[in-house]
Amino acid sequence: MTSQNTAVPTARKPLDLRSLLDNWAMLMAAVGIFVLCTLLIDNFLSPLNMRGLGLAISTTGIAACTMLYCLASGHFDLSVGSVIACAGVVAAIVMRDTDSVLLGIGAALLMGLVVGLINGIVIAKLRVNALITTLATMQIVRGLAYIFANGKAVGVSQDGFFVFGNGQLFGVPVPILITILCFLFFGWLLNYTTYGRNTMAIGGNPEAALLAGVNVDRTKIIIFAVHGVIGALAGVILASRMTSGQPMIGQGFELTVISACVLGGVSLSGGVGMIRHVIAGVLILAIIENAMNLKNIDTFYQYVIRGSILLLAVVIDRMKQR
Amino acid sequence: MHAQQKQPDNTGASLCFNGIGKAFPGVKALDGISFSAHPGQVHGLMGENGAGKSTLLKILGGAYVPSTGSVQIGAHTMAFKCAADSIASGVAVIHQELHLVPEMSVAENLFLGHLPASFGLINRSALRQQALACLKGLADEIDPQEKVGRLSLGQRQLVEIAKALSRGAHVIAFDEPTSSLSAREIDRLMAIIGRLRNEGKVVLYVSHRMEEVFRICNAVTVFKDGRYVRTFEDMSTLTHDQLVTCMVGRDIQDIYDYRPRERGAVALKVNGLLGPGLREPVSFEVRQGEILGLFGLVGAGRTELLRLLGGLERNSAGSLELCGDALRLRSPRDAIDAGILLCPEDRKKEGIVPLSSVAENINISARSAHSRFGWLLRGGWEKDNAATQIKALKVKTPTAAQKIMYLSGGNQQKAILGRWLSMPMKVLLLDEPTRGIDIGAKAEIYQIIHDLAARGIAVIVVSSDLMEVMGISDRILVLCEGAMRGEMSREHANESNLLQMALPRQRAASQGN
């Protein structure tokens, strides 16, 4: 017994180093790119640019935290870009009509929750494919945002609201602080709660998770509901930065978020994902975009470059699995 | 028949393995394997799991390139770089997982890769004719237009064999071909293999099942730990025990290690249960400390019955009583909360979360009861419980953090048992607990089952392995085609009366059923 089985486990011993590299490689790459940009690009490290970079990370970063859960459970959510726009519009309208910042934000988050619940229930209970479900809600919510806003941006005049987007604490913009808090919280949630572990199990093998007693449907619904709320939070912060709710904002944002996650190493097929993957992916995408802007690279070329980076990342990921 | 690709004329050629070695990072899966298989013979390959049989077949099939040595057919040394090379040289490997496209028709599957076509347009009638010619004598009842997904497993295998023959295969290797076949399908397969042998093909036959090897093979080669042990050329003088001893490398006593036990009150009572897969209401009871075997052929409804008891399916009629209290199951969680725990048949598909660690796989079910507020994990408990179960069940893994997919089947099964041993348990449902597990690990799992029963847990074991059912059960229920056929005490059960009950009665006139 001992002799015949030792072969399998010991065979994987050398992989520990590799898995360590797998886990941290993208984060190291992000740091590497950062250092490279610092050395090669003037003004990259300037406080103004760092602030801009941080803000660019914030919206993607917040939404990517919960997209991680969708991906880890073997699904994804395309409606998040629309939720961001609609949340800003809803917040702006409710504040205009009630003059209450709290009510405005509450309404926006509630809207996100409802969209998330609908996504979750349709996917988990009615077993509809996540692609179709969220493609549909993406369009519905986008349409609603335009309808609510009458097709135009809705201005906000409550000063209290601008704290979220433009406030500072110890010199650090509030959106960046909220992003860091999200990274910490959702990273912790994934590793130290039954909810987080169940999410990974569902993505890794839904049938085994069900047989092991995991409430698969409920967990999925929670994943999408939380994602809806966090998407709306990102929308509120964006609206606060823009000082208005804009129904046309965030088109294609869902793809940026998914790209960031996958670039960092989250698996599209579920069961693999860590918060450091998300952080790495968000950082790399944002730094490269920032560098391209500083270098005045044409937007058209930027698309090509961003797409190529994503393609390269997934090809590398694929090759690692061989 | 149809236009074949250029085939080397292999008639009368032997298959030789010359010092085949295969190394994966950190492990030698095969080391210096040399033996020959001759035309007109069925050559058995035996060995415990991990012995290297499957690796050798993968080399033969072109999926792996050997690190050392070569494969020789007749006078030609082969250098297979990919599956296509191997096929072109007249080799066909029929794998455990069949390589067919379920959504496509039988005919399309047979000629996938070289469909009869002119200018890219498929010639439907030629396709049908060629498919019929292929299936003739093998499986005449199969309609070439049928989707493969609608065929039984046995029929799919025949399609695979027909595909191999249509490509002019001279060497045909079977990897555990009978693992999911019914007795009748096995008979048919054996007849076909016998025919291939008589036609002068080289047949390699990998199986765990002794009786099949003795039934069909003309020679047997035994592997152990990736090394060649010995080839028995004369099956008539070979005994069952000799072969097992050679495989295990030591004498095995009674691996079932049955010990009589005290039985307590009725743990689970099933009254007239009906549900998907059951044709007639099923009633039985199982006592605390009792090991109840459920025997039946594939399709008898054994797995379906366990799925009902495990809360995976809803019953349409009937009721359950657990320790005297009525029980309704709406989900696996209900069953788990009640203390009815199910180890599923398909470990890979339904048992393990492959990418997660051994510890995760053990702790997944019990953890919510041990977490703060039911959701905040206690690191200490997580670590201790995994370590305890790994130790108690002798799960062989370098660390608890190892991904479970890297463990052998037996150790995965033990980890799943560890998952349930972390929970309060009243009834344990085991569906084919030792399928695909080597003899050493089997004995350990039987030991665990006995220990659990001795602790007063009611155990229901589903198995298609007759020896296993008879070896471990106190009492055996036999199912046939979705209905309960009868019950047999340990003392009265033997192979023939169990099989008699399990076989569908087509000439049912004499029976009062």
Image (tube, rainbow, N blue to C red):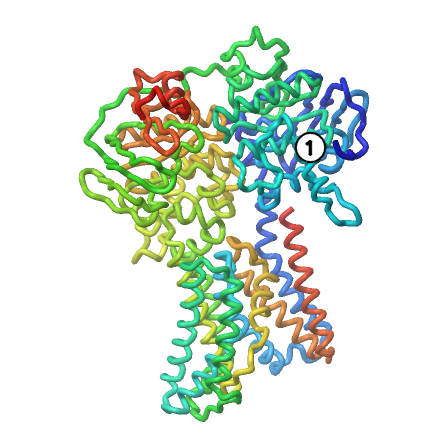
Q: How many marks are shown on the rendered structure?
A: 1
User: Label 1 amino acid?
Assistant: Gly
- Residue A90 located left or right of residue B44: left
Query: Would you name the residue on which mark 1 appears?
Result: B61
Name above or below for residue A249 compared with residue B401.
Answer: below
Q: Residue furthest bottom?
A: A157
Q: Position of residue B355 (x, y in %)?
A: 51, 47
Q: Residue furthest top?
A: B237
* Residue A301 seen by the camera: yes
Name above or below for residue A19 compared with residue B300.
Answer: below
Task: Tell me which corner region of the image, top left, top right, bottom left or bottom right, holds residue B459.
Answer: top left
B446 or B345: nearer the viewer:
B345
* Quadrant placement of the C terminus of chain B: top left
Q: Position of residue B77 (x, y in %)?
A: 80, 26
B92 or B397: nearer the viewer:
B92
Task: Tell me which corner region of the image, top left, top right, bottom left or bottom right, holds residue B58.
Answer: top right
- Residue A106 located left or right of residue B203: left
> How dense is the environment of label 1, judged by Cα within 10 Å: few (below 14), some, or many (20 and up)?
many
* Residue A1 seen by the camera: no
B451 or B298: nearer the viewer:
B298
* Quadrant placement of the N terminus of chain B: top right
Q: Position of residue A251 (x, y in %)?
A: 58, 76
Q: Position of residue A314 (x, y in %)?
A: 64, 58
User: What chain does badge 1 belong to?
Assistant: B
Point 40% across, 49% down: residue: A210
SS label for mark 1: loop
